[in-house]
Image (tube, rainbow, N blue to C red):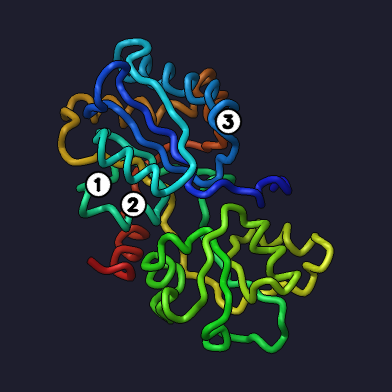
Amino acid sequence: MRTRDLVRIVAPVLLLAAPGALAGPRDVAVNVTRLGGDSASAQPFIDEFLRYVESAVGWPAASTKGSFLVSKKEALAFIAGNKPGIGIVEPPLYFEMRKAWNLRPILQVESDDLVVKRLHVVVKDPGLKTLADLKGRRLWTLLADYPTYLSKVVLAGQVDASTHFALKQVGQALKGVRGVIRGDCDAAVLDDEQLAEARKITGGQDLRAVFTSPALPPIPVVLFGAGLPEADRDALVKGMTAMCGTGKGGEICGRMHIGRFVPVDTTIFADAQKRYGE
């Protein structure tokens, strides 16, 4: 875990569309919050990933292109307007838009760097011991834009985050950490590695969790509706499943912090869906 991993852009989104046309069933939307960076620095990795997938799946070379957006608002607008057929999306976006976009998981991402297995509500004030103690208090989190997911999946329905806390969306986990340490906010939401790194910061030794989430779902690879032909879907699953185990594909996966693409864990998604509700 590198210290820079505490610094995250809010919902960076890589959107891939066919050149000169609206997106179609083979085009891709990627929403992965741990990639960070900006459009310029991400472009070589985007192009490399696309060219490999095209080759592995048997699609024409240079038939897709990529853009990097940095907000949920931009992601929703672009996806609604361009209607891609394939996505790699963070769980909060998946659950929020699952029904509206008719999302169907076909694979999931394994990654020590990208996938959040659980989250903690972290405080410093020794007088704060439970979620109940945070009633009306300031909570800074990357999930303020997803209050239903935060409330029902992360907090397991213990409280309604939108009314229980004074929520503030932050673009970096480190901002929440510093907010708690300085007293600018009362709590932040961190994963295991972020909390471990935060405790190494001056003033962070007293940080502690007052709530820990159940196991959280990983990042799914999804289809938007049924526009992608079955043969393309099967080729995509086969190509992406094998990608990170090949020489060239493994190098690309490594540079993008992807361990591998694997079959969907239906149990963990079903458990999360049950908490989230319809």
Which mark, by number, is residue 254? 3
Q: Is 143 placed above or below 68 here?
A: below
Q: Amino acid at mark 3?
A: Gly
State the image coordinates of residue 24 (x, y, percent, origin top left). 23, 27
Identify the mark nearer the N-term, 2 or 1. 2
Quarter occupied by the C terminus: bottom left
Decide: marks 3, 1 in contact (CB < 8 A)?
A: no
Q: CA distance from mark 3 to mark 1?
A: 27 Å
* Foreground: disc 3 or disc 1: 1
Q: Secondary structure at mark 2?
A: helix
Identify the mark nearer the N-term, 2 or 3. 2
| Disc 3: CA contacts within 10 A as few (<14), some (14-19) or many (>=20) | some
- The quarter of the displayed image where residue 242 is located: top left
Q: Would you name the residue on which mark 1 appears?
A: 103
Q: Amino acid at mark 2?
A: Tyr
Which mark, by number, is residue 94? 2
Q: CA distance from mark 2 to mark 3?
A: 24 Å
Identify the mark nearer the N-term, 3 or 1. 1
Q: Is residue 150 left or right of residue 27?
A: right
Q: Is residue 249 left or right of residue 194?
A: left
Q: Residue furthest right?
A: 202
- The quarter of the displayed image where residue 92 is located: bottom left
